[in-house]
Image: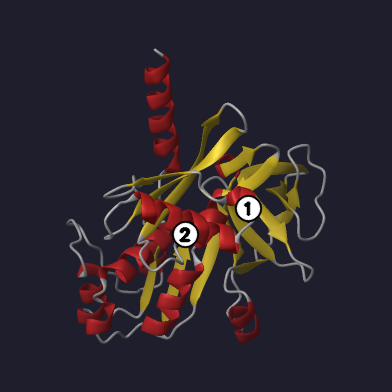
């Protein structure tokens, strides 16, 4: 993303760019965007959440005319922050390292107002479908793996997606972020988005952990300024239950000072899964 969206493409178009090389303190991204009169900003969804959580955005006067995010799905609470702060809709791009950009959001008021997370196929080199692991095409509204028809064959993306009745694609996270508990298939992204709607939750990451009865259960890692307590755990569990199906609430919640991130700034769930696997192995020994 940094090489293409932030360097090669802007330079090829003669556009001035700005890059942070130092550790970003709280509110630094807001300050930089305002001071340098940045008009076009592209970032991972996590970066926008960091701006929201800094609480500093309201202190600055921005010149933003275009916003994009990529690399991971974005939660509704952060989209609300973007709308209220920048007064510019956040567009989304989706692609893979091997193929490039595949889907991009349409900046149409009808789409933006009804479902900000929707994407439409733009790549002329690819045909996109949502399919099961056996390549059977899924029905509209169902979740399957996003596959691309290129060079006379279906290529896997390892990402999940669903298609609505109008033919728009919804990115539903990585295929390895699926949690199956007692036969129920759950989306880590959907549970995270629900937790992020809670006023005291700054960041959240969800994974599946082993369970003797159900195979897997949901575990949530939560970053918050509120003191950890058993009552807070119960509150978050009930909050999730009220908004999702009963089986989707996090049976385990761990509070953390920060979440592991990839170099691109995305929440690194694989690291969390590896940590939990190491804990389980240590207990078994």
Give the Cα separation between the discs numbered 1 and 2: 14 Å
Residue 47, horizontal then vertical, whole percent: 35, 62
Q: Residue 195 bears which disc, if any?
A: 2
Disc 1 element: helix
Displayed quadrant of residue 4:
bottom left
The coloring applied to the image is secondary structure
Q: Residue 224 at what x, y percent from top left?
A: 31, 58
Can residue 52 be seen from the camera position used here? Answer: yes
Q: Position of residue 235 (x, y in %)?
A: 44, 58
What is the number of the mark on residue 17?
A: none
- Which of the two residues, 154 or 216, is positioned nearer the viewer here? 216
- Of the 4 image quadrants, the one containing the N terminus is bottom left
Report whether 122 appears left or right of 276: right
Front-most of residues 272 and 152: 272
Q: Quadrant of the C terminus?
A: top left
Badge 1 is on which residue? 246
How many neighbours does mark 1 have within 10 angstroms: few (below 14), some (14-19), or many (20 or more)? few
Give residue 279's quadrant in the image: top left
Rendered residue at 61%/75% (across/down): 106
Q: Say which residue appears at 50% left-offset and 61% top-offset.
A: 239
Q: Residue furthest top?
A: 285
Of the image marks 1 and 2, the number of the one nearer the N terminus: 2
Residue 225: horizontal and vertical position, in percent?
26, 60
Name the residue: 46% across, 67% down: 197
Q: Marks 1 and 2: which is nearer the front? A: 1
């Amino acid at each position: 993303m940094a090489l293409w969206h932030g360097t090669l493409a802007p330079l090829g178009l003669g556009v001035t760019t700005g890059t942070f090389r130092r550790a970003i303190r709280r509110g630094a991204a807001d300050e930089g965007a305002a001071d340098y009169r940045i008009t076009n900003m592209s970032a991972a969804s996590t970066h926008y959440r960091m701006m929201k959580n800094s609480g500093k955005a309201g202190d600055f006067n921005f010149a933003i005319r275009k916003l994009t995010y990529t690399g991971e799905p974005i939660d509704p609470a952060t989209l609300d922050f973007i709308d209220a702060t920048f007064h510019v809709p956040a567009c989304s791009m989706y692609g893979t390292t091997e193929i490039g950009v595949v889907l991009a959001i349409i900046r149409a008021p009808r789409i933006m107002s009804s479902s900000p997370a929707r994407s439409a196929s733009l790549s002329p080199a690819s045909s996109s479908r949502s399919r099961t692991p056996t390549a059977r095409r899924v029905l509209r509204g169902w979740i399957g793996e996003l596959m691309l028809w290129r060079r006379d064959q279906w290529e896997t993306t390892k990402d999940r997606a669903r298609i609505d009745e109008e033919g728009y694609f919804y990115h539903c996270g990585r295929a390895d972020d699926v949690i199956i508990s007692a036969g129920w298939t759950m989306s880590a992204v959907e549970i995270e988005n629900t937790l992020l709607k809670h006023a005291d939750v700054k960041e959240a990451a969800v994974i599946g952990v082993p369970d003797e009865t159900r195979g897997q259960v949901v575990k949530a890692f939560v970053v918050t300024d509120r003191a950890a307590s058993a009552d807070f755990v119960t509150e978050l569990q009930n909050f999730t239950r009220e908004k999702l199906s009963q089986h989707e609430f996090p049976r385990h919640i761990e509070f953390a000072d920060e979440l592991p991130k990839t170099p691109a700034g995305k929440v690194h769930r694989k690291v969390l899964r590896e940590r939990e696997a190491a804990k389980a192995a240590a207990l078994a020994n």
